[in-house]
Structures are given as C-alpha cells and as structure tokens.
C-alpha cells in the first residue's frame, strides 16, 4: 500500500521534509495540531502541557500498562499562527539524538483539502539518520492516517 505521507531525506543532509495532503479543510487540519483533545486521539499519547502561542511550551507522554513512562517529548513554540504555521522545538527523552527544530506549514488546497509540510532540522546528519533508522516514515504515515480518520469524523459532526 502506498504511503500518503512522503518523507524526503537527501543523503548527507541534516534535515528532512515530510508532506501530506489531507481530505480536510485547512481549519480542521490545524485544529488537529492545536487542540490537545484531538492531538491525544491521533497521536495516541497524553498531552501533559500545551500552550499554543509564541514562547509557549508543550509536553506529551505515554505510559505502559504498569504506569511507567514509555515515551516523553517536549518543546517550545517559537511561532504559532492559526491555519498558517507552527515553529517548535521537539526533544524526546532518552533519545540518542538531541533537540530538533520543526517548521510546520499548513496550506489550503481547496475548501475541503489541505496540505501539511514539515521541515525538520537536526543538529547533524548523523542525528537525522539515527531517527530514520527507526520506523519513522512508517510511524508518521500511520499517525497521519489516524489524524485523517479521526478529524474526518469531527468534520461530519460539524
């Protein structure tokens, strides 16, 4: 099955680009990245903190069935413009690579479709390649598929 989320990572570079077109209006695609209740549904993680504004911060975590933290990530918003862009740092606890800088741009294609472009910058090509060794492309595609499915249901109830 073709992955709808595309990951472009040029050899030897310290960044990558993720693109995905959604069958969602621009406003709903942005909401999926700006409302904790929706983020929790499609990402499958708890939003511990979310201050959707310039210089605000965020934190997500997932616990295993025994209550131990299995995943934790956090960062700071450097720009937060509804329906346009989010610029943020992203740092995962216990990862072998450091903080990354993410530029998320939201684009209206039609009244019912939109596009997300994520430009992710790492400290080094080695850090980026380390993350790509994980099932990064597969995982982000699965998450975006859930985003499409969950937010489409919101669209129907709107």
Image: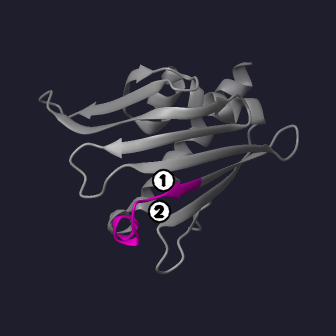
Distance from the alpha carbon under mark 1 to that under mark 2: 5 Å
Magenta part of the protein: which range?
Answer: 119-129
Q: Nearer the viewer, residue 46 or 99?
A: 99
Residue 26 visible in the current orientation: yes
Quadrant location of residue 34?
A: top right
Q: Residue at x 46, y 42 (%)?
A: 89
- Decide: few, some or many residues near mark 1? Use Cα within 10 Å; few <14, some 14-19, many ≥20: some
Quick check: is 128 in the magenta stretch?
yes
- Residue 5, can we see it? no
**In x, y percent, where is residue 37?**
50, 21
Q: Is residue 85 left or right of residue 41?
A: right
Where is residue 5 drawn, in percent x and y?
59, 59
| Residue occupied by mark 1 | 140
| Nearest the eye: 14 or 36 | 14
Quarter of the image with the C terminus is top right
- The residue sitting at 14% across, 32% down in the picture is 68
Above or below for 79 versus 9: above
From this view, report whether residue 36 is shown above or below residue 136: above
- Residue at 46% x, 68% y is 14
Q: Are marks 1 and 2 in contact (CB under 8 Å)?
A: yes
Is 83 displayed left or right of 125 in the figure? right
Q: Dot 2: what SS?
A: helix
Name the foreground residue: 144 vs 108: 108
Disc 2 target residue:
137
Q: Give coordinates of residue 18: x percent, y percent.
A: 58, 58
Q: Secondary structure at mark 1?
A: helix
Say whether residue 30 is left or right of residue 72: right
Q: Which quadrant of the rendered structure holds the N terminus?
A: bottom right
- Whether residue 140 is in magenta: the answer is no
Q: Residue furthest right?
A: 110
């Amino acid at each position: 099955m073709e992955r709808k989320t595309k990951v472009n990572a040029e050899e030897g570079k310290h960044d990558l680009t993720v693109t995905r077109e959604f069958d969602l209006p621009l406003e709903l695609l942005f909401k999926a990245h700006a409302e904790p209740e929706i983020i929790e549904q499609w990402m499958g993680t708890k939003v511990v903190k979310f201050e959707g504004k310039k210089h605000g911060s965020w934190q997500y975590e997932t616990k295993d069935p025994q209550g131990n933290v299995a995943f934790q990530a956090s960062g700071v918003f450097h720009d937060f413009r509804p329906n346009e862009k989010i610029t943020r740092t992203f740092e995962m606890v216990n990862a072998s690579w450091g903080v990354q800088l993410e530029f998320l741009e939201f684009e209206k294609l039609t009244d019912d479709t939109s596009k997300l472009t994520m430009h992710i910058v790492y400290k080094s090509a080695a850090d980026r390649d380390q993350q790509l060794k994980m099932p990064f492309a597969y995982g982000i595609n699965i998450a975006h598929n859930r985003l499409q499915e969950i937010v489409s249901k919101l669209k129907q109830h709107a």
